[in-house]
Image: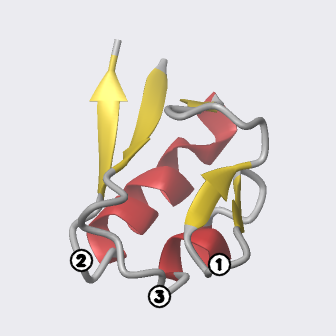
Amino acid sequence: MSRLHIDWTACDGRGVCTELLEEMLVEDDWGYPVARDSRTEPVVPPPLEAAAKQAVDRCPMLALRLLRR
């Protein structure tokens, strides 16, 4: 099982991750990604692993990481 780590200090709110992972992430009032379940490191369900990896790979600011636990 993986968790998605969002580095808010690196993020500039472009919204790529929220488009690729709309089942898990939404934008806050300033355009930054937040987990729909309000966790700081949301669990990535197995069916969304590929989409989460794609979001990590496409983040222009390198602000996302998948943590394996």
Residue topped by disc 3: 14
How far, Cα to Cα, is label 1 from label 3?
10 Å
* Residue type at tag 2: Met
Rendered position, 63 above or below 67: below
Tally the numbered discs. 3
How far, Cα to Cα, is label 1 from label 2?
15 Å
Residue topped by disc 2: 61
* Residue type at tag 1: Glu
Viewer-closest of 62 and 46: 62
Question: Which percent across, then down, holds residue 13?
Answer: 47, 81
Name, please, the residue furthest toward the bottom.
14
User: At 63% across and 55% down in the image, what residue appears?
Assistant: 34
Reading the chain from its start, which is encountered first: label 1 or label 2?
Answer: 1
Q: Do the residues labelled 2 and 3 touch (CB within 8 Å)?
A: yes
Reading the chain from its start, which is encountered first: label 1 or label 3?
Answer: 3
Q: Which of marks 1 and 2 is in front?
A: 2
How crowded pointer 2 is (Cα within 10 Å; few <14, some 14-19, many 20+) is rated as some
Q: Is residue 10 left or right of residue 29?
A: left
User: At 31% across and 29% down in the image, what residue appears?
Assistant: 67
* Residue type at tag 3: Arg
Q: In this view, does 13 lie to the left or right of 8?
A: right
Label 2 residue SS:
loop
Residue topped by disc 1: 19
Question: Which percent across, then down, holds residue 23?
Answer: 78, 55
User: At 27% across and 61% down in the image, what residue appears?
Assistant: 9
Q: Are marks 1 and 2 in contact (CB under 8 Å)?
A: no
Label 3 residue SS:
loop
Reading the chain from its start, which is encountered first: label 2 or label 3?
Answer: 3
Label 1 residue SS:
helix
